[in-house]
Image: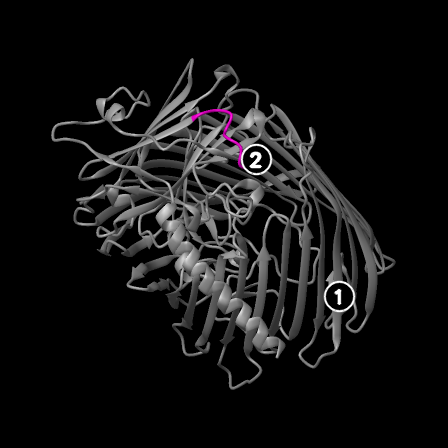
Amino acid sequence: MRSRAFAWVILTSLADAATAVAQETNSAPSVVAIRLVDGERIDVDGRLDEAIWRRASPATNFAQLDPQNGAPATERTEVRIAFNHDRLYLGVHCFDSEPARLLGNQMVRDGPLASDDRFMWALDPQFDQRSGYFFEINPSGAMGDGLLVPAGGGGGGGAASGLGFGVTQNRAWDGIWLARVDRHERGWTAEIEIPFRTLNFDPEAAAWGANFQRTVRRKNEESLWTGYGRNQGLYNLTSAGRIVGIAGASHGLGLDVKPYVIGTHTAAPGSGRPSIIKGTYGGDLVYHVTPLLKSNLTINTDFAQTEVDDRQVNLTRFPLFFPEKRDFFLDGSGSFDFAREPSSDFTAFFSRRVGLDANGRPQKIDYGAKLTGQAGRFDLGALQVRTAPQAEAPGEDFTVLRSRRRLLRQSYAGMIYTRRAARDAVRPVRETVGADFELATSRFRGSQNLLFSGFYAKTPGGGRGDNALYGLRVNYPNDLWNVRMSYRVVEKHADPAIGFIERADYRRWNPVVRFGPRPRDHRVIRQVSMETWAEWLTDTSNALLGRAFRITLAEVALHSGDTVSVTVNPIYERLERNFAIGGVTLPVGNTYQYTRYTTNVSTASRRMLSANATVQTGTFYSGHRRDVTASVNLRPRRGVLATLTAQANRVDLPETRFTTRILRALVNTQFGPFVSLANNLQYDSVSGVLGWQVRFRWILTPGNDVYFVSLNNWIDAAGGYRALDRNTATKIVLTRRF
């Protein structure tokens, strides 16, 4: 009876939500896009002095998300829209009563703007209220963008950031567009040009979804055009307004040709191998099969310009998860999401399995082909990649097929198939097949978010059973109460072909309750949150493996942007296999009960000097452990950012005693929005390797780039550091559109 009652609540909520959304769509604010007349043009210089901007009516009357939710924004913002056959234009005026206090330190493309004044906007050109595009600029002309894709766990950025429910941002997408800004005595203005070829859009749509958000950093104020409710936000596309009047827009032929040439120099003095100098070429061919469906063919793929991974030290019993950073795999990655689990300990498709070995070293990719987008009510993703044989491994073929059928406004049901086949007769073909669903609404009880989801997958092969993975999750992610309950089973022989699992042979129950009240009219405190996170783990025979609680006694966010939190983490573990740590082995079958205590203090990043410090101490298995992590950010002037991070982990067990350290220095210099130089210096005491990556990027025009990347590694040996290897690459990428 209870399960039927719960299902009835979900279904009636979704039905009510569909009615509410239909009503709200009719009442959503709209702005009219004005078409340029023949011969009229916009010179993108940020000044808004063309006649078209005087003819266009603005989207205005922004309201605060924070600090005074629903109150009018303290600084006026006006957004005007224009277009011609090929391009969409935005004219933005951010009025400011104290223009001398505008903050705009960041200048690099896709750099974080969390410390700056900024203007952000979301576009939903398909008007499906599920996916779209994100853009942002600051008063120094820095440009950032990303794809808006369905979020794991039903979350977005959270209401506190004004980002919202059900959608998250894939920052790896680099769209071709242009923005220029102008600062003056009335604030700052911006002109933005977005070619229609940059976007997937429905040419028959009567309107586009859109929303705009302004940040006034010195006041820590966020305001939006619409969707400013605590449980809404910029990413909540069901709360967006509309752009009307766009007609006759063209994709052209929908063909992008992106050739590249690269020269590399590789030396390994630590191994005695000779230096290698070589040049090569390759490229991508991108074709819009339809305005909503894009194909991509990459040949002789190279990722020399990719940023190096951040160092991590593993003091757990499980493998570490490193995020994907390669453009080919990140572009359109939302089309391959499966189950959307909020944690990173399970995914059916993990693209780092393709073209990277177990140590993260690149493997040559002969070619890759990809199809992503929409066809009718279906979201589609197809991927085929072939890697070249190398001394350590044969070449492999990777296949991924993914489809999702959109249901109601925010729900779906889908399937996935993956295949990994080595091109030899020794290794077996490994496959995964699965299905998942999600029922979601942002209109539960009027304006609350609610999500119910589940998945089931099997990894057949090797003639073994017990190879399934499945789970269910209920999520109520809202500003005051954020509650979820999940149940997951990973059977003993489950092994996703191109996926990632942290461990196998377990059942997991994971309830989370978070309460975040906001003191009314408090001069200092913005929000105080408390959370209880719990986990119970058994093996698939129901023998207890562990239980853990993470109790956040208080997380206090101030109006200034500073935060402080205190957490207690009692843990029980039974080792189901030997655990090697610090040169000793804790034997299988041992049980441990210990408690960790964590304090974090973070100062507002808008300041010239800001810091973040975390101290974790307490018992650890049979002994004690103390972890200290500290970061200092220095912004001496516009375009310069230095970040120094140090992490030390001290472990004292009766069996062993050791300390691990990570040191990282990031120094980024931006000579303008299109020219940047990044230095990343890292050291960890486990490998004893000191690494230094220099990355120079010059954007000639959007889509046409020059990269210079150098990576040097030294090993900490007796008597000092000894050169291990050097890799240098110069790469030129061009884009031609037809």
Q: CA distance from mark 2 to mark 1?
A: 37 Å
Vertical placement of residue 325 versus 556, above or below: below
Going by the image, does 285 lie left or right of 619?
Answer: left
In terms of secondary structure, where does tag 1 sit? strand
State the quadrant of the C terminus: top left
Lower sequence index among marks 2 and 1: 2
Does 547 lie within the magenta span?
no
Residue topped by disc 1? 547
Q: Position of residue 59 (x, y in %)?
A: 36, 33
- Give, as a three-letter code, the residue at label 1: Arg
Going by the image, does 104 lie left or right of 689?
Answer: left
Mark 2 neighbour class, 10 Å CA radius: few under 14, some 14 to 19, many 20 or more: many
Vertical placement of residue 304 versus 575, above or below: above
State the quadrant of the N terminus: bottom right
Q: Which mark is residue 66?
A: 2
Vertical placement of residue 396 versus 90, above or below: below
Q: Position of residue 534 (x, y in %)?
A: 72, 61
Q: What residue lies at 66% left-to-right and 73% top-to-bottom?
A: 507
Q: Position of residue 323 (x, y in %)?
A: 52, 52
* Main secondary structure of the magenta stretch: loop
Going by the image, does 38 lie left or right of 86?
Answer: left
The residue positioned farthest toward the right in the image shown: 654
Stretch in magenta: 69-76
- Give, as a three-letter code, the residue at label 2: Asp
In terms of secondary structure, where does tag 2 sit? strand
- Can residue 76 be seen here? The reply is yes
